[in-house]
Amino acid sequence: MMETEKGSLEGNMEAALIAPCGMNCGICRGHLLRKKPCAGCAGSNINKPEGCKTCTVTICVKRQASQSGFCYECKDYPCLRIKQLDKRYRTKYNISMIENLAFIKENGMEKFLDKEVKKWTCKRCGAVISCHIGHCLNCGPGGREKISPLSKQNS
């Protein structure tokens, strides 16, 4: 089992961890690592996986010019890259970047983060559930709290 942050959600559910595409980096396995955690797509490149460093969404000039920094402001939204990410994350992890961005645009960041805390908090120990492995990293796969990527549980 990989080493992870243990305990509270503090520092894992904040606006700075919401990527321009709508991904909540606070629930990403790379961010939850204790040793060499990724700072998220909008953070520094230190410890960031290569694919994230060169992500076309992160380096998109049109998106960078937007007031909010989110893709939903772009005239080309949703672009091919967002559609591809959305399809992959819907299929593998039951997360929609397009739905996340629509929620943020319509309801604001604070309400989005409140919703994410409810969805991704382990009811057993209170830690963050990793979207990439579908369970709390403290309780592990044998713990009672599990989000199935194919179900709408905790949505």
Image: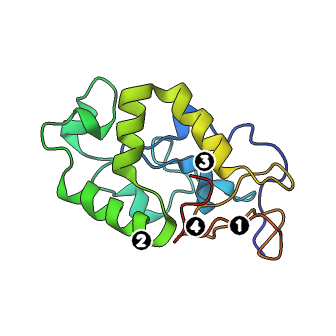
Q: Position of residue 96 (x, y in %)?
A: 40, 55
Distance between the alpha carbons at the discs numbered 4 and 1: 11 Å
Q: Which residue is mark 1?
A: 146
The residue type indicated by label 4 comes to His
Q: Which residue is mark 3?
A: 26
The foreground one among 25 and 60 is: 25
The residue drawn where x is 37% and y is 40% is: 101
Residue 14 showing in the rendered view: yes
Q: Quadrant of residue 133?
A: bottom right
Distance between the alpha carbons at the discs numbered 2 and 3: 20 Å
Q: Earlier in the sequence, mark 2 or mark 4?
A: 2
Q: Secondary structure at mark 2?
A: helix
Q: Which residue is mark 4?
A: 132
Q: Secondary structure at mark 1?
A: loop
Q: Earlier in the sequence, mark 3 or mark 4?
A: 3
Q: Earlier in the sequence, mark 2 or mark 1?
A: 2
Q: Which of the labelled discs sits on residue 91, or is there none?
A: 2
Q: Position of residue 29 (x, y in %)?
A: 62, 62
The residue drawn where x is 57% and y is 67% is: 132
Distance between the alpha carbons at the discs numbered 2 and 1: 17 Å
The residue type indicated by label 2 comes to Thr
The residue type indicated by label 1 comes to Lys
